Amino acid sequence: MAGEKETTKVAIDKYRRFLHEDHVAAAGTMGWRHGNPPIYDSVNNVFEQGRTKVWPEGSLEETIQNSIKTFEMELKYKTCIKDFRTINPEKFKLFVNGREGLSAEETLKVGGYNALLKNSLPNEFKYHKEDQETFESSHTAFRSAFSRGFAWEVIKVYTGPPVVTYKFRHWGFFEGPFKGHAPTAEMIQFYGIGIMKVDESLRVEELELYYDPAELFGGLLKGPKNF
């Protein structure tokens, strides 16, 4: 899922393909949301200190893990779908918890958090009102809550290409305020399942994600409300 925090400098990142080479090759022509590509040192530290699996270099598990991290980076920081290298832009669809799929352009427009947290609850019961959030406001809220970043790892890969099925874990430390709720400094984590249809170049054509958002918001809403 989308949510790993970084600053914006040029750097080589061993977990995110293309990040450094895209910046060098594009020579300033690529559309980065904040002007430059990000650096992920902070969340990489959270990831390395808290991961439960260390996959062998070149393994299917490491390849899938790094591919998803790279897609998250592109979705969060690139402004033009034509610059995405992890997906097939013409075929891409994102499905979350069985809902109607979003195209690449639709996903980029609303942003990762709004795409992933949309649900069918009546508005008065929603913990995240995606129709009232922008790309920037949703990311600002989670950057505040997870000040060191929101790490992500592959737990298990069940099937290989062309349809990759995997289990993932997402975690971070609630160290900043979230929509008026005071931080608890506790670790918040949740697990989910991903099903990813890829082409011969491992570009994603369809991505299905299944998880329980209550596992995330149960921790975020636990902090006392600041009125």
Image: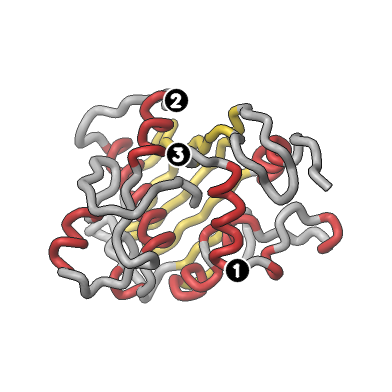
Pick whichever of labels 2 and 1 is earlier in the sequence. Answer: 2
Count all numbered tags in the image, as a single digit: 3
Residue nearer the viewer, 147 or 66: 147
Q: Which mark is residue 195?
A: none
Can residue 158 be spotted in the picture? no
Which residue in the protein does label 2 denote?
A: 50
Which label's residue is closer to the chain start, 3 or 2? 2
Could you tell whether 97 is left or right of 227 in the image?
left
Q: Indicate the position of residue 2 as horizontal and vertical percent values.
A: 49, 51
Q: CA distance from mark 1 to mark 3?
A: 23 Å
**What's under tag 3, amino acid-wise?**
Trp
Q: Residue 225 appears in which quarter of the rendering?
A: top right
Residue 152: mark? 3
Amino acid, disc 1: Thr
Q: CA distance from mark 2 to mark 1?
A: 30 Å
Mark 2, secondary structure of its residue: helix
Residue sitting at x 46%, y 57%? 207
Image position, residue 81 (x, y; %): 36, 73
- Characterize the local packing of mark 3: few (<14), some (14-19) or many (20 or more) Cα atoms within 10 angstroms: many
Tag on residue 134?
Answer: 1
Q: In the displayed structure, would residue 98 be above or below residue 84?
A: above
Looking at the image, do the residues carrying marks 1 and 3 touch, with CB atoms under 8 Å apart?
Answer: no
Q: Is residue 109 left or right of residue 6?
A: right
Relative to 219, say whether 7 is above or below. below
Q: Residue at x 37, y 47 (%)?
A: 69
